[in-house]
Image: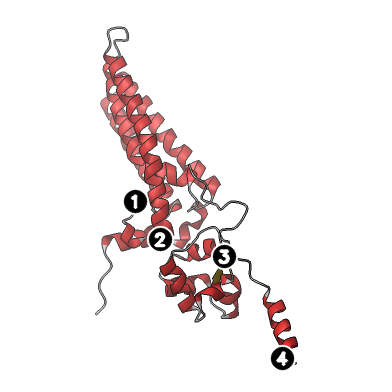
């Protein structure tokens, strides 16, 4: 009897779909990465201007941005064949080696993003700035989304996958 | 970050493309036999990835040749040279 594929095996097969080959060029990866950064910037702008618009418009805008983000991030992961997110059990030795390189590099980038986030949060609370509430929301929300996508950015922009 | 591509001097030499072509095997077929992604075969053929001993042995077994017929630390003589020299010696 053949064992049914695990979740990781199914995910690996989906991310390695040959029909996504057009996304696996350096140019497509750069475009997708720029698109994802664009979504994060748009999200920050939307949160920053939330007070100036009706709640329904804000919520609608967020839903659209989240949908665009899901597709962009999905495209970016397909462009890297998901080596940064898949378990080493479903990767071969070369892919597992790349995964290790991605995580060591992401760790350094993440440390920088974390320090910037903490400094911005401290500055926003300092009496000299008196940052509005929106800024206090934007900084952690965008930083968190950036942090969870760092390995994908590193893989797409720096690795030969 | 360290370079993923080897320095100008290759770390190893391989006859993988010739042996694979000789057997009419696609990269995908060889990859399935060796238990790796087909892309990895391409990186090996271009000398851009050094295989582990286990993978090198699996590839040699899949091609039914000894390990040193596939990978070497020194450049391989061309197949044509080897064939004709051998024939010349036999005459």
Q: Which dot, 4 or 1, sits closer to the camera?
A: 4
Q: Which dot, 1 or 2, sits closer to the camera?
A: 2
Q: Disc 2 sits on a residue from what chain?
A: A
Residue A10 appears in view: no
Among the two numbered marks 1 and 2 on one chain, the one whose residue lies closer to the N terminus:
1
Q: Residue at x 55, y 45 (%)?
A: A27
Q: Secondary structure at mark 1?
A: loop
In contact (CB < 8 Å): disc 1 and disc 2: no
In space, the residues marked 4 and 1 are separated at their CA atoms by 57 Å
In contact (CB < 8 Å): disc 3 and disc 1: no
For the residue pair B53 and A86, the one nearer the viewer reads as B53
Residue highlighted by disc 4: B90
Residue highlighted by disc 3: B73
Q: Residues within 10 Å of mark 3 (few under 14, many from 20)?
A: few
Q: Secondary structure at mark 4?
A: helix
Q: Disc 4 sits on a residue from what chain?
A: B
Looking at the rendered structure, whether the residues under marks 3 and 1 are on a common chain is answered as: no
In percent of width and height, residue B61 lies at 46, 78
Q: Residue at x 42, y 57 (%)?
A: A95
Relative to B37, does residue A110 appear above or below in the rendering? above
Q: Which dot, 4 or 2, sits closer to the camera?
A: 4
Residue highlighted by disc 2: A93
The number of numbered badges drawn on the structure is: 4
Residue highlighted by disc 1: A85
For the residue pair B32 and B9, the one nearer the viewer reads as B9
In percent of width and height, residue B47 lies at 56, 61
Query: Given the current orientation, which residue lies at the most extreme top position?
Result: A128
């Amino acid at each position: 009897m053949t064992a049914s594929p695990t979740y990781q095996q199914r995910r690996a097969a989906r991310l390695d779909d040959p029909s996504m080959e057009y996304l696996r060029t350096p140019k497509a990866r750069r475009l997708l990465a720029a698109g994802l950064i664009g979504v994060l910037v748009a999200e920050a702008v939307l949160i920053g201007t939330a007070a100036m618009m009706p709640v329904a418009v804000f919520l609608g805008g967020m839903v659209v941005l989240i949908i665009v983000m899901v597709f962009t991030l999905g495209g970016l992961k397909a462009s890297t064949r998901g080596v940064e997110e898949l378990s080493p059990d479903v990767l071969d030795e070369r892919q597992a080696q790349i995964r290790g390189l991605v995580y060591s590099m992401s760790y350094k980038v993440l440390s920088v993003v974390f320090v910037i986030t903490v400094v911005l949060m401290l500055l926003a609370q300092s009496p000299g700035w008196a940052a509005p509430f929106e800024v206090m929301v934007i900084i952690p929300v965008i930083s968190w989304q950036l942090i969870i996508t760092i390995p994908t950015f590193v893989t797409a922009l720096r690795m030969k996958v | 970050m360290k370079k993923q591509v080897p320095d100008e001097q290759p770390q190893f030499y391989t006859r993988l493309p010739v042996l694979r072509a000789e057997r009419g095997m696609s990269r995908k077929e060889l990859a399935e036999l060796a238990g790796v992604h087909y892309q990895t075969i391409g990186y090996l053929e271009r000398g851009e990835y050094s295989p582990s001993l286990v993978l090198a042995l699996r590839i040699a077994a899949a091609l039914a040749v000894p390990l040193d017929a596939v990978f070497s630390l020194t450049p391989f003589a061309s197949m044509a040279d080897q064939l004709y020299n051998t024939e010349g010696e036999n005459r």
